[in-house]
Image (cartoon, rainbow, N blue to C red):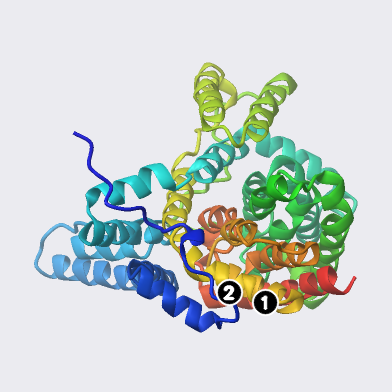
């Protein structure tokens, strides 16, 4: 027997009465009165955001509890065992599980409010998980040995022009890598850039200030670096078809400004940190003894032949071309798993844990995000061009920027300058937090071990603020 759906959640935005001249505050109050679950869903979403800020504290507390448990075990002559309490605290400290955890709370609240049929209909029939699935597949493909080796050899040619020093690698990865995101997609660019930064930069143990500056710069550059085409950046994908934007349009209105911003931000940080980057050249890599060296080449593998790299690139191309069709790119990925097994003598162990965690993070985020349109759409529609840009940038910091631009497509009669303003704000603010842009959780997951296992939201925002300001100036003043 099929569970009945009492009524749809969320309510269609067109179902709310439109009162001309009504203030935004009055509009939001009216919508909460019409559908009280709006306030419940947004309250749970805010708790999830607060949880992301507290994740580092949970992780630190988990280590403290485990050390205390081990000390008590040694004092009583018992063998040391993992502490259940420490394990639960560590689970709460994993940023990748935060939104999924609170999605369970959200669905429980929805079930209590409107019944299981409504909750099931929302989670299964309303929420679009295509982006989360795509990120899992493209991350797994981009982190394979042939692809990383190909990317590293390609970027090495550029880094060699600067002497292949850590500073030369740093500049190359943070400029060329994000621009490649316009062609291989932003999640793939983030994966490759993060893996190469881990190997060529973070393993040298730079200062915490430079670590966060680099991470913030990476997130901002990747967010704006995907705007040279109409198919690579998630926030652009959301509007390209409804608004008729193609690659020539993106190049003429967004792409060249993005390149200028990337070069200017990277040059600015290079000047600020040039002394430390120069010192890294004489510093040996110091690996974290508590973490495996994910970048080390496994012994006994044969050199990767050119034909194998070509096949991997073909699998990536298939995934990118069919990014909107899960049956096709998931089917291609299953075929790839068999191919990787058959060519195991050239392959390192396929990394699936990190892509799956990132996919879980994004899936939880879209579950929450799908219920925030009741307040985001009125806020966006009430703003003129400059406030809309600033509002889009700010909202992006607390929500996935693809959701912001998607909701903008639902605003009727939006002028062309306003359309550009909302997308510019969405991509400019995409580096301020881990949740601001879909590829960011991938970078956080791959580089988190260099930040004590958890990236500080305050540290990330501090590292991203200057590149964000430069990007804003490039998009709004040029």
- 401 and 158: which is toward the camera: 401
Eyeballing the image, is 70 above or below 197? below
Q: Position of residue 386 (x, y in %)?
A: 75, 77
- The structure residue drawn at horizontal position 19% and vertical position 60%, both measured from the top left corner, is 84
Eyeballing the image, is 477 above or below 142? below
Left or right, residue 330 beside residue 346: left
- The structure residue drawn at horizontal position 53% and vertical position 63%, both measured from the top left corner, is 435
Q: Quadrant of residue 185?
A: top right
- 22 and 335: which is toward the camera: 22
- The structure residue drawn at horizontal position 87% and vertical position 74%, both measured from the top left corner, is 477
Quarter of the picture containing the N terminus is top left
Q: Residues within 10 Å of mark 2 (few under 14, many from 20)?
A: some
- 467 and 62: which is toward the camera: 467
Left or right, residue 446 beside residue 473: left
Eyeballing the image, is 461 above or below 187? below
Q: Position of residue 290 (x, y in %)?
A: 42, 57
Classify mark 2: helix, strand or loop: helix
Q: Residues within 10 Å of mark 1 (few under 14, many from 20)?
A: some
Residues at discs 1 and 2 in contact (Cβ within 8 Å): yes
Residue 83: in sight, yes or no?
A: no
- 71 and 232: which is toward the camera: 232
Image disc number at residue 408: none
Residue ID for mark 2: 379
Residue ID for mark 1: 383
Residue 300: in sight, yes or no?
A: yes
Left or right, residue 160 beside residue 324: right
- The structure residue drawn at horizontal position 59% and vertical position 53%, both measured from the top left corner, is 439
Q: Quadrant of residue 339?
A: top right
Q: Disc 1 and disc 2: Cα gap in Å?
A: 7 Å
Classify mark 1: helix, strand or loop: loop
């Amino acid at each position: 027997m099929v569970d009945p759906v009492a009524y749809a959640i969320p309510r269609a935005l067109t179902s709310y009465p439109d009162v001309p001249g009504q203030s935004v505050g009055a509009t939001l109050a009216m919508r909460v009165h019409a559908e009280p679950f709006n306030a419940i869903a947004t309250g749970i979403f805010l708790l999830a955001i607060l949880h992301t800020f507290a994740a580092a504290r949970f992780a630190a507390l988990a280590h403290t509890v485990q050390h205390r448990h081990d000390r008590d075990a040694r004092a009583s002559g018992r063998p040391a065992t993992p502490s259940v309490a420490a394990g639960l605290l560590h689970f709460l400290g994993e940023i990748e599980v935060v939104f999924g955890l609170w999605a369970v709370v959200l669905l429980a609240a929805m079930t209590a409010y409107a019944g299981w049929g409504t909750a099931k209909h929302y989670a299964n029939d309303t929420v679009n998980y295509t982006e989360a699935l795509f990120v899992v597949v493209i991350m797994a493909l981009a982190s394979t040995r042939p692809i990383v080796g190909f990317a590293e050899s390609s970027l090495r040619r550029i880094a060699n022009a600067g002497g292949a020093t850590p500073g030369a690698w740093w500049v190359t990865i943070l400029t060329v890598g994000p621009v490649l995101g316009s062609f291989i997609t932003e999640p793939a660019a983030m994966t490759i850039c993060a893996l190469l930064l881990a190997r060529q930069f973070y393993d040298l143990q730079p200062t915490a200030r430079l670590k966060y500056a680099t991470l913030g710069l990476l997130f901002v550059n990747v967010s704006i670096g995907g705007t040279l085409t109409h198919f690579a950046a998630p926030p652009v994908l959301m509007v390209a078809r409804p608004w008729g934007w193609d690659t020539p349009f993106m190049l003429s209105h967004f792409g060249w400004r993005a390149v200028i911003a990337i070069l200017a931000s990277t040059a600015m940080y290079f000047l600020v940190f040039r002394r430390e980057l120069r010192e890294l050249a004489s510093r040996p890599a110091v690996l974290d003894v508590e973490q495996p060296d994910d970048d080390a080449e496994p012994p006994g593998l044969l050199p990767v032949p050119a034909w194998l790299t070509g096949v991997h690139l073909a699998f990536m191309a298939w995934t990118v071309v069919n990014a909107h069709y899960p049956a096709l790119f998931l089917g291609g990925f299953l075929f790839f798993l068999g191919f990787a097994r058959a060519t195991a003598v050239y392959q390192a162990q396929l990394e699936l844990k990190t892509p799956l965690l990132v996919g879980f993070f994004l899936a939880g985020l879209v579950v929450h995000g799908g219920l925030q349109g009741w307040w985001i759409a009125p806020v966006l529609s009430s703003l003129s061009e400059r406030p809309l840009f600033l509002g889009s940038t700010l909202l992006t910091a607390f929500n996935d920027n693809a959701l912001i631009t998607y909701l903008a497509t639902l605003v009727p009669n939006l002028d062309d300058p306003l359309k550009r303003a909302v997308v510019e704000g969405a991509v400019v603010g995409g580096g301020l937090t881990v949740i601001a842009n879909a590829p960011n959780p991938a970078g956080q997951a791959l580089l988190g071990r260099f930040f004590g296992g958890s990236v500080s939201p305050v540290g990330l925002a501090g590292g991203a603020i200057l590149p964000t300001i430069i990007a804003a100036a490039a998009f709004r003043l040029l």
